[in-house]
């Protein structure tokens, strides 16, 4: 037994000595593995020799020696791979603070990575584990009583802190580090100014970024294009296209070459601003071409989108032709879709169809947006035959219509109140396994409302909920409107009371059970739709009652509500002229807006002479005669 132990210990020692001689690192894990292998060999030999009585022979010893060598070899291979991987990772890391502080002339060289900055922090102060603590580590230390310590002359250390502040939106702190660099005698170059400028832009401080941009120019430094682009993009996000354009022009005057991003950011600012200006993108595209910066799909899309916002079809087409005529840009489906959309918003359906045809002739494959945009144009005018032709054309080119396409086609049935046709297309959509959404159901309910078919409207409302689509207030308003146009005032008010979670005071046939979603809240349009059902028969008392309930719920009458109430007075027999005049005066005294519809109804109720006299008394412009 003692011989076995002695041989095991000798095997472990010889293995360790061999690893030390070859320079391999011996860690605790490997040592425990070797000891465990030796102990297991001893236990097994003990069991074999003393329990089973098998004498130890030279062949058995050789066998166990081979097994031990095999286990030891596996452990050595595993340890070697582990050590190699650790050394490779170790060699990639800087070994000292000096290695991290590579000469940058300050900042003319490549900016260090986040890992390098974090390693620099750990090198200066081992307690720092995150790159977010770099600035705290690099906080300048005052010299001690012996005059030793890290002073403020280390421009590279301050530069790292300056970068850190910029990366983490600490513009004020970045300015302080910049001032400390100047006090230490370091001469900041353009990259320092750029870092502070970007710190302000990341914080959304356009004024601060512009101020530092001007400071750099006054100091004779020329920031690079990234500094100007940062200010331009921040101005664009703040919807300040004029400021973005001024910075771009200053960039050109400073002889800093802008790129496509510079121009596109300004064009996007004009396209998405509160006051869309089509002339601005046109100027920028011209400027872009003059400086030989090639427009791309983003340029064309943003410029045409800005023109679409104001319905300037001619300018959009001119921009398109100017860019394409350069011969370096091939428009795709997105570009053509933008032009089709511009023509539709300008209410020029013929031009929209012409651009779709040109798109097909130029070999550009249209997508579902291309055809659906034209479908919407036909739906808006109620030209259902043209919309159906557009649907067939879409299918002929192998483009599958989506729920938006079918909703546009159903919407085309509203003008003529063709419920049968609308239901046909709606059922075809469901047959095509296209799930209807709240918009498509709302459009179908609107068709039923236009036809005054309240029974079908209620049927589709129930179907909608059964399909798992929760109706919104617009859907319920369409059902009430269907009851109103179907001359079923009591049912219209019953739906209103259902939405108010109240019991109807009138006896009507049982409404279908529909659970009103919690987030559905009645609006002014809901009360107006219910009141219009009574107004159509001249029941002005009920109209007044509904509107009184509406105002009791802190919803004031608007011009549409006024029109419904005046029409109730006009249809009443006898006509309620005094009430109509009193309500109109009260509406004017509250400063409410007056449009043509209530004025026309007022003229019908009061007569031309009295209406003109009243308007003159109130200092209002006379409405045109019908």
Image (cartoon, rainbow, N blue to C red):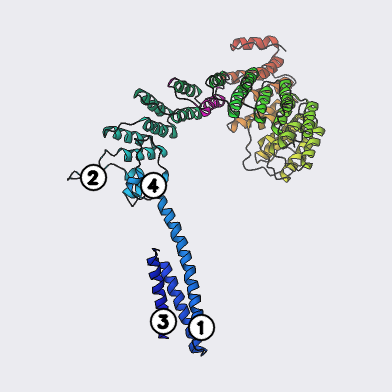
**Earlier along the polypeptide chain: callout 3 or callout 2?**
3
- Whether tag 3 and tag 4 are in contact, CB under 8 A, the answer is no
Name the mark on residue 5: 3
Mark nearest the camera among 1 and 4 is: 1
Measured along the vertical axis of the image, is residue 587 above or below residue 180?
A: above
- Checking the image for residue 118, the label placed there is 4
Indicate the position of residue 285 as horizontal and vertical percent values.
56, 21
Q: Dividing the picture into quarters, in which one does residue 19 lie?
A: bottom left
Residue 382 in view here: yes
Q: Quadrant of the N terminus?
A: bottom left
Do callouts 3 and 1 mark residues in contact (Cβ within 8 Å)? no
Dot 3 crowding, Cα within 10 Å, few <14, some 14–19, many 20+: some
Front label number (2 vs 1):
1
Q: CA distance from mark 2 to mark 1?
A: 69 Å
User: Residue at (71%, 35%) from the top-left corner?
Assistant: 404
Mark sitting on residue 60 = 1
Which span is picked out in magenta?
A: 253-278
Q: Which quadrant, please, contains the C terminus?
A: top right
Most foreground residue, 90 or 517: 90
């Amino acid at each position: 037994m003692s011989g076995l132990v002695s041989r095991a210990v000798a095997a472990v020692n010889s293995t360790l000595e061999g690893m030390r001689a070859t320079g391999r690192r011996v860690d605790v894990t490997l040592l425990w593995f070797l000891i465990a292998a030796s102990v297991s060999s001893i236990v097994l030999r003990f069991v074999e020799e003393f329990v089973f009585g098998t004498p130890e022979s030279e062949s058995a010893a050789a066998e166990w020696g081979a097994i031990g060598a095999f286990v030891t070899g596996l452990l050595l291979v595993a340890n070697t791979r582990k050590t190699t991987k650790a050394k490779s990772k170790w060699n990639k890391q800087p070994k000292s603070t000096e290695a991290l502080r590579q000469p940058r002339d300050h900042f003319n060289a490549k900016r260090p990575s986040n890992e390098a900055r974090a390693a620099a922090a750990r090198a200066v102060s081992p307690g720092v584990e995150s790159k977010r603590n770099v600035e705290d580590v690099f906080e300048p230390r005052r010299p001690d009583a012996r005059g030793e310590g890290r002073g403020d002359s280390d421009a590279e250390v301050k530069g790292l802190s300056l970068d850190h502040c910029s990366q983490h939106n600490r513009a004020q702190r970045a300015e302080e580090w910049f001032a400390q660099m100047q006090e230490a005698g370091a001469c900041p170059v353009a990259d320092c100014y750029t870092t502070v400028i970007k710190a302000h832009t990341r914080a959304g401080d356009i004024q601060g970024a512009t101020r530092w941009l001007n400071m750099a120019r006054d100091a004779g430094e020329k920031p690079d294009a990234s500094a100007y682009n940062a200010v331009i993009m921040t101005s664009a996000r703040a919807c300040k296209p004029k400021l973005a354009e001024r910075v771009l022009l200053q960039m050109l005057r400073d002889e800093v070459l802008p790129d496509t991003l510079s121009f596109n950011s300004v064009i996007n600012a004009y396209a998405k601003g509160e006051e869309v200006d089509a002339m601005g993108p046109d100027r920028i595209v011209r400027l872009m071409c003059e400086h030989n910066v090639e427009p791309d799909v983003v340029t064309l899309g943003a410029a045409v989108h800005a023109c679409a916002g104001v319905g300037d079809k001619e300018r959009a087409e001119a921009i398109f032709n100017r860019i394409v005529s350069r011969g370096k840009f091939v428009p795709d489906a997105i570009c053509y879709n933008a032009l089709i959309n511009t023509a539709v918003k300008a209410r020029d359906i013929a031009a929209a169809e012409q651009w779709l045809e040109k798109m097909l002739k130029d070999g550009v494959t249209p997508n579902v947006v291309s055809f659906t945009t034209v479908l919407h144009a036909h739906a808006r005018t109620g030209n259902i035959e043209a919309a159906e032709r557009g649907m067939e054309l879409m299918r002929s080119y192998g483009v599958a219509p989506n729920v938006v396409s079918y909703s546009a086609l159903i919407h085309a049935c509203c003008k003529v109140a063709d419920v049968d046709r609308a239901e046909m297309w709606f059922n075809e959509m469901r047959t095509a396994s296209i799930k209807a959404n709240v918009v498509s159901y709302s459009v179908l309910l609107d068709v039923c409302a236009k036809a005054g078919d309240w029974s079908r409207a209620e049927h589709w409302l129930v179907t909608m909920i059964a399909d798992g689509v929760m109706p919104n207030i617009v859907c319920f308003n369409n059902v009430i409107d269907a009851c109103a146009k179907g001359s079923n005032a009591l049912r219209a008010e019953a739906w209103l009371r259902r939405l108010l979670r109240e019991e109807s005071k009138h006896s009507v046939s049982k409404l279908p059970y529909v659970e009103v979603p919690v987030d559905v809240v009645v609006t002014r349009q809901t009360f107006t739709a219910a009141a219009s059902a009574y107004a159509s028969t001249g029941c002005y008392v009920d109209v007044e009652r509904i509107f009184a309930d509406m105002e009791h719920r802190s919803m004031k009458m608007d011009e549409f509500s006024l029109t419904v109430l005046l029409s109730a007075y006009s249809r009443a027999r006898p006509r309620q002229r005094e009430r109509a005049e009193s309500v109109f005066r009260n509406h004017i005294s509250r400063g409410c807006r007056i449009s043509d519809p209530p004025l026309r109804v007022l003229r019908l109720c009061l007569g031309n002479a009295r209406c003109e006299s009243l308007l003159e008394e109130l200092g209002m412009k006379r409405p045109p005669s019908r």
